[in-house]
Amino acid sequence: MTPFGAKLRQLRRERNVTAKEMAAALGISPAYLSALELGKRGLPTWYMVHRIIAYFNVIWDEAEELQRLAEVSDPRVVVDTSGLEPEATELANLLAQRISGLSKSSLADLTHRLRVAAAKDGA
């Protein structure tokens, strides 16, 4: 499941909306909505994200969060390290090899550390 998919499912459940009801309201198939939630589709389009925001009638902060989550929810990530330092290639490969064995707390810790390092380096 992607971060966007998890948030989408959370919003549906909080509002007691079935996937079938939401899909019908958005004019998409329940299968497509399920695939979006489970991360079995690529990134949702900008148009789809805005239709979902309108459907839930969320406030600005939550709408911005949905947009941000959509941007970081591509389930098929490719990391191109050509031209970068050897350490970048090692990091990308280690992450690819070991990510499936990491706990939720370890993933959160690594995500936080990467954001801090990127902010420090101006990336």
Image: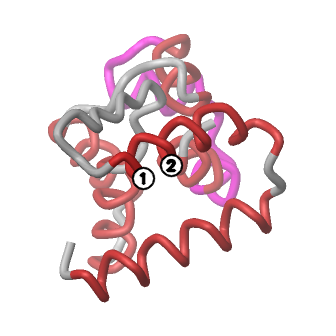
**Residue 6 colored magenta?**
no
Visible residue check, residue 65:
yes
Name the residue at 76% across, 64% down: 106
Tags 1 and 2 in contact by the CB under 8 Å rule? Answer: yes
Determine crowd level at label 1: few under 14, some 14-19, many 20+ residues with C-alpha closer than 10 A.
Answer: few
- Dot 1 falls on a residue whose secondary structure is helix
Mark 1 sits on what residue? 87
Visible residue check, residue 55:
no
Determine crowd level at label 2: few under 14, some 14-19, many 20+ residues with C-alpha closer than 10 A.
Answer: few
**Residue 18 colored magenta?**
yes
Give left or right: position of 53 versus 36: left
Give left or right: position of 3 versus 50: right
What segment is highlighted magenta in the picture?
11-29
Quarter where residue 24 is shown:
top left
Q: Is residue 113 above or below residue 65?
A: below
Residue 45 point in image, percent of width and height:
21, 33
Front-most of 116 and 10? 116
Quarter where residue 39 is shown:
top right
Mark 2 sits on what residue? 91
What type is the residue that disc 2 sits on?
Leu
Front-most of 84 and 20? 84
Quarter in which the N terminus is drawn: top right
Give left or right: position of 35 versus 46: right
